[in-house]
Image: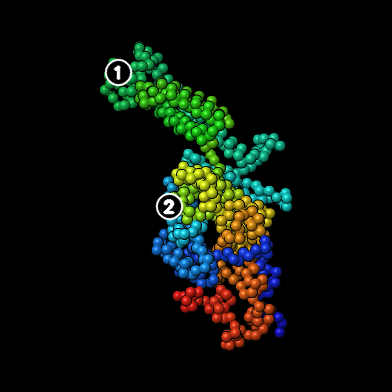
Amino acid sequence: MGDDYFYEGADYGTDPEYGTFSQAYVGEMYKNISLATDARVANQLKAATEKLNTGATSVEISTISPDIFETIPKEHFKELNRLRKLVGGNVELTLHAPLVEPTGLTKKGWDEHDREQAERQMVDAVIKAHELNPEGNVVTTFHASIAGLPAETEIWEGEGKEKKRIVKEVVVIDENTGNFVQIPVRPSQFLSEDKKEVSIKDKISEINEKNWYDQLHHLDYAAELGESTIEKGIKLIESKENKKINEKDIINSYKDYVTGKTEAFEKFLEKEKPEVMDFYKDQMKTISYGDINLRQAYNNLKEIFDQSYRTFELSNSEKAKENIEKLDKFRAKIEPRINELNKPENLIELAKTVRDGVHVLRSIETSQIPQVLKPLKEFAINKSAETFSNVALDSYKKFGEHSPIISLENHPAGQAIITSGRDIRRLIEETRDRFAAKAVKECGLSKDQAREEAEKLIGATWDVGHINQIRKFGAGDEELKIEAKAIAPVLKHIHLSDNFGIENIELPMGMGNVPKETFRWLKEESKNFDKIKKVVEVGNWYQHFQSTPLQETLRAFGSPIYAPGAGSYWSSRGYFSGYGMNPEIHHSLYGAGFANLPTELGGQIAGRSRLSGSPME
């Protein structure tokens, strides 16, 4: 019989794969390993108990679905805190809050009311997180952005040092409408060979410039059409034989005509022949057509004026101030008559006002044209920072030094707007800045105190499996290193899951190709790395393999479960079983084996309570 007929037994503690991730930076990663509960269930009290029974010293309450989160009784959060105290030791609970898009963006576009609603949902999650440990700072993870919204298409091309990140498609948002526009980034064939490459910023500016002049063209055309049509109708009436009538009389007659005062209009025409009366009525229709075009132009003028004014107000440049002065001057000129312009008898003045407005807008320099279309990523960072800073401030006002920590997680790469380390760090820094400014103004903190609280209460949850998915776009270990070092200075929490860089399959660490150097890269740039909780987040593993990933994870991180520095002393590669040289049945019968241990520790008894010794239901 060959060796194929025998089970090889357990691994040596000196196996090359044993402690892969700890060896990468020489640390005791296993000391802060945490397990995540099943996010699909509302009974998180039971789910947390099951995880604590495995021997875990920390558990993350996973409540990814907003619907399931709302189903959890509020008493459960207090009971979870009692459970934490009952288990004793240094047991900690953290919370993975429901997935909520913080920007207010939906597939239909953006709306401020949707952003405010998201903010309220997050505030509710933070209040419940506080119940898990009212005397601590519960790490509460929110996704920086979620799936379902358009994201930049970026790939990595080249090899080695020549490899570079290339954006193939950028997504922009129209701030006025909240709608998305996807713009492919291609070389310009209009430019000479050495100037073909156009940056994303230049591309967006080019589109904004085109849109600006399109708006002015439509505005100017409508104003010109309206004014010329009105003049045509008036001149035809004035030139009619045997009829002495001036422009004022015609406009007054038009007022009667357009307001339905037929008696006055018919009196004006009472001495005319029927064919002459038909002629006058036709010219009134001509003037009415011009009037409609003119009023459309006037309404467009007001919209463009407001849009430009808002844009210039947000800028502190001298040119922007000059443009505001131009707009203020124009407004001051027409303001005394603005209510009169809607009256039919003031058509001529309305036409002149619109033409003057077009001239003022046309005088704005090309470099100062309002940037209506903005990169969606920039827009998302701005709106998300507003949401998260408000959530953190609300929490600080309620709970002070025991406020939960707002920790922003990267979504799987390529599936959301904000997923990279550099972008999440930018979001965190912007959120901290806004929180600090608001805390100074609303809470009476000094600038130094506010900054200290911001850095304490706002940071990042880094999912090493989610970022590993940039591999499918051509990235490699070097790009993963860049991302890790970008996020490390703001790191508060880590999610552990492995994959092969393609799909978010959530394997235990060591079973995919997440670089073993990941934790060394993070440790080199972050503060208190060894104290940061590392949460085993492998929902797919539970679903498919129906077992805890703790054993596989501890092995990957070199935990001396039984003896310091090595695996269990019975783990030589013997025959018949992994418990040593003798058959498993021998030890089960005579009490010298480990079969009666929980499955999480290598035995056969599932679900035994860590607290009482009785099986769990």
Q: Considering depth in this image, is 284 or 199 the residue closer to the camera?
A: 199
Picture quarter with the N terminus: bottom right
Q: Which amino acid, by three-letter code, is at mark 1?
A: Phe
Q: Considering depth in this image, is 462 or 295 the residue closer to the camera?
A: 462
Question: Horizontal and vertical percent for residue 107?
Answer: 48, 49
Question: Horizontal and vertical percent for residue 420?
Answer: 59, 51
Give the numbered dot on residue 398.
2
Q: Is residue 117 left or right of residue 424?
A: left
Q: Considering depth in this image, is 435 or 149 the residue closer to the camera?
A: 435
Q: Is residue 421 left or right of residue 436?
A: right
Q: Considering depth in this image, is 489 or 267 the residue closer to the camera?
A: 489
In this rendering, the answer to whether 103 lies above or below 194 is below
| Residue 478, image quadrant | bottom right
In this rendering, the answer to whether 25 lies above or below 421 is below
Q: Residue at x 47, y 78 (%)?
A: 614
Q: To which residue does mark 1 refer?
A: 268
Picture quarter with the C terminus: bottom left
Report the colour scheme.
rainbow
Question: Horizontal and vertical percent for residue 233?
Answer: 40, 20
Q: Which amino acid, by three-letter code, is at mark 2?
A: Lys
- Distance (Cα) linking label 1 and label 2: 75 Å
In this rendering, the answer to whether 244 lies above or below 562 is above
Q: Earlier in the sequence, mark 1 or mark 2?
A: 1
Q: Residue at x 56, y 47 (%)?
A: 429
Question: Horizontal and vertical percent for residue 532?
Answer: 57, 59
| Residue 210, image quadrant | top right
